[in-house]
Amino acid sequence: MTTPTVTSGITAAELYRLVNQPATTTGEVAAIEWPAGAISLDEANQTLIWELSDYGNLPITLSRSENEWIAMAPIVAVESVNNTAELNDVLLRQGISLPLASVGIVDIDGHDFYVAYGQLFGDSKLESICAELHATAGAAMEVAELIQTHFV
């Protein structure tokens, strides 16, 4: 998917339309390579929901609030991890090495999940939003591999 660049703050619905529009062929405006995958819009919650085929069908949300965008990808249910104290220590110690993303625990449908997330200003450039989606997805994949290898 490609999108012409825009630098002003936009809503989730406006971003959804931009991501889904055909690439410009005029060459006047740079194109952005959004992650490949199915995308839907939850307009009531100002959230875009992707299933990223580039990242093994990883689900990721991009939510808009008044002043920020939050990208979030669930990794694994906390209850699935054998030693959460050790994993938490490992994640806190290597957090700096995860580019542009953080790892936390959030409640999803009544269950705690490890998630990768990133935050941006609400008026961030589209290129920054796109980069954050890739960074958050990449971090989620790295943490999932760590957990799969050592903690389940």
Image (cartoon, rainbow, N blue to C red):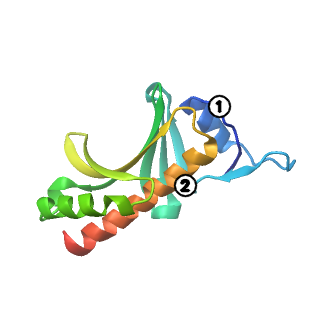
Residue 82 on image: x %, y %: 12, 65
33 in relation to 109, above or below: below
Decide if residue 91 is on the left or right side of residue 57: left
Q: Residue at x 29, y 70 (%)?
A: 146
- Compare residues 61 and 128 and report the one nearer the observer: 128
Residue 91 on image: x %, y %: 26, 60
Q: Residue at x 22, y 64 (%)?
A: 90
Look at label 2 and name its amino acid.
Gly
Comparing labels 2 and 1, the label whose residue is closer to the camera:
1
Q: Which circle marks residue 37 in the picture?
A: 2
For label 1, the crowd category at 10 Å Cα-Cα, with few meaning under 14, some 14 to 19 and many 20 or more, is few
Residue 75 on image: x %, y %: 31, 56
Decide if residue 72 is on the left or right side of residue 129: left
Q: Earlier in the sequence, mark 2 or mark 1?
A: 1
Q: Residue at x 19, y 69 (%)?
A: 151
20 in relation to 56, above or below: above
Disc 1: which residue: 8
Element under label 2? strand
Decide if residue 109 is on the left or right side of residue 14: left
Report how far apart the C-alphas of labels 2 and 1 lie in the structure.
Answer: 25 Å
Decide if residue 141 is on the left or right side of residue 15: left
Q: Which circle marks residue 24 in the picture?
A: none
Residue 13 on image: x %, y %: 57, 31
For the image, the number of numbered tags is 2
Look at label 1 and name its amino acid.
Ser
In this view, the residue farthest toward the bottom is 149
